[in-house]
Amino acid sequence: MSHPVIYWIRRDLRLHDNPALHYAVQSERAVIPLFIMDAEEKKLGAAPKWRLGLGLEYFWGGLEKIGSKIIFRSGEPKSVIDELIAETGAESVCWNRLYYPVARQRDAGIKESLRERGIEATSFAGALLFEPWTVSTGTGGYYRVYTPFWNSVKGREVQVEYPSPTKIKAPLDWPMSENIANWQMSKPMGRGACIVRPFVRLGQAAALERLAIFLDEDAAQYPDRRNIPSVLGTSGLSENLALGEISPKQCWHGGQRALYEGIEGAEIFLKEVVWREFAYHLMFHTPHILDSNWKPDWDKFPWQTDENDAVVLAWKQGRTGVPFVDAAMREMYVTGRMHNRGRMIAASYLTKHLLCHWKIGQKWFEQCLIDWDPASNAMGWQWSAGSGPDATPYFRIFNAETQLEKFDPKGLYIKQWIAELDQTPSDTAKSFFDAIPLNWNLNAKMGYPTAIISMKHGRERALNAYETRGF
């Protein structure tokens, strides 16, 4: 009983419904929460790294209230864990699973190594509703299309949530910890951090509050309002799910209760929770979705791959001359998020009207989104480009102008984000110029650019490119 348990923190920054933490606490041993800044964490994009830093500091505060804290170490995880075991005499290590390929391989190696030495190593399902290997088709394969996947899991029982610990037993002597401030996780964000910070919903309490408000006030209108970019018609929980500040089980059970109470829109919300599961299902079974065309036929398509091309820069800067695209990109720089309808429009425009490789957009979103998630980001981009599973057909090319007329007929979204098109621009529109890199040399007094390419011409060019390549 004197040998502590090391709880390895990853994307599970919550006290409630945290299987690994619950296991460690229930052991009645001292618990040493550990976060490791390894090579994978170091290469995170600017926005997700900054948001992770905020989340860790908040979680640290929550742990302190119940008698614990976080030990921060940097280095290769296996070496860090081995060193901490040697220092503390720990005989057990636990964690909640990650599912991207590098983490799976790394964790399997660590688990095997620990067990060979007689150290208990236990991993738990804390990030998903259903483990990817437990969902299969009638023939035992994996699902390639969302609707059959949804039909397969919608009636499954989801486990009850683990309770929050009220006290965590501390070791007699805490091991040395690095200072998280020295990691400078906010540095890559530059001046943008101050602009985005007011839009962050930080921590477990904020996530649970947002879920409750959404289910009580917004879920009934969710099927319609989720497509209107000028209003808060969605749950807004993607950033919290990405860091595990709320669990998918909490979202699922909340949605199920709302559905039981007669709020029909809650089913659409549940489908969106499962859409996230589908992304992880695909990443687990076809990991090449992260860095290669999911459909090999698309390898022959002549994507434009130069990240420094002028049209790519215009897209990144929100100055394509297409208001819906530009508003979506600017929303991302000010809030760290982008409305889902805007994501579809911005992604379709880059990959179809501009014929740029989806990897360019995937990489840029990884830099800029505080709700960045490897599985969802990859699937979203490949869905938009047409190269992914259950993708939008290659010949379906969103017209950003008609989409704007349909989902923002009063121009409220444009007013929120594009200063150059308004004589009295909104504060959010002006904030864009305070958030972006100084070397872009942009200001609110610049004229709004003409469109890089017309909707009609871009569509015709894309269709011709597809036809030429035999699609």
Image: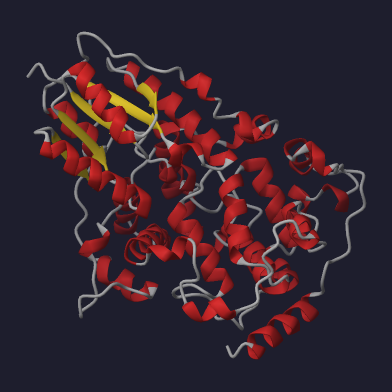
Q: Nearer the viewer, residue 86 or 205?
A: 86
Query: Can you say whether 4 is above or below 158 in the image?
Result: above
Q: Nearer the viewer, residue 324 or 180?
A: 180
Q: Position of residue 430 (x, y in %)?
A: 80, 40
Q: How is the image coloured?
A: secondary structure
Can you tell which quarter of the image residue 169 is in? top left
Can you tell which quarter of the image residue 198 is in? top right
Left or right relative to 443: residue 111 = left
Kindly tell me whether residue 143 is visible in this rendering: yes
Can you tell which quarter of the image residue 191 is in? top right
Q: Residue at x 20, y 17 (%)?
A: 88
Quarter of the C terminus within the rendering: bottom right
Total marks shown come to 0
Q: Residue at x 24, y 45 (%)?
A: 109
Left or right relative to 427: residue 282 = left
Query: Can you say whether 321 is above or below 318 in the image?
Result: below
Query: Can you say whether 67 is above or below 439 in the image?
Result: above
Q: Position of residue 458 (x, y in %)?
A: 76, 77
Q: Position of residue 369 (x, y in %)?
A: 57, 46
Q: Residue at x 77, y 44 (%)?
A: 429
Q: Residue at x 51, y 63 (%)?
A: 380
Q: Position of residue 123 (x, y in %)?
A: 21, 43
Quarter of the N terminus within the rendering: top left
Kindly tell me whether residue 100 is visible in this rendering: no
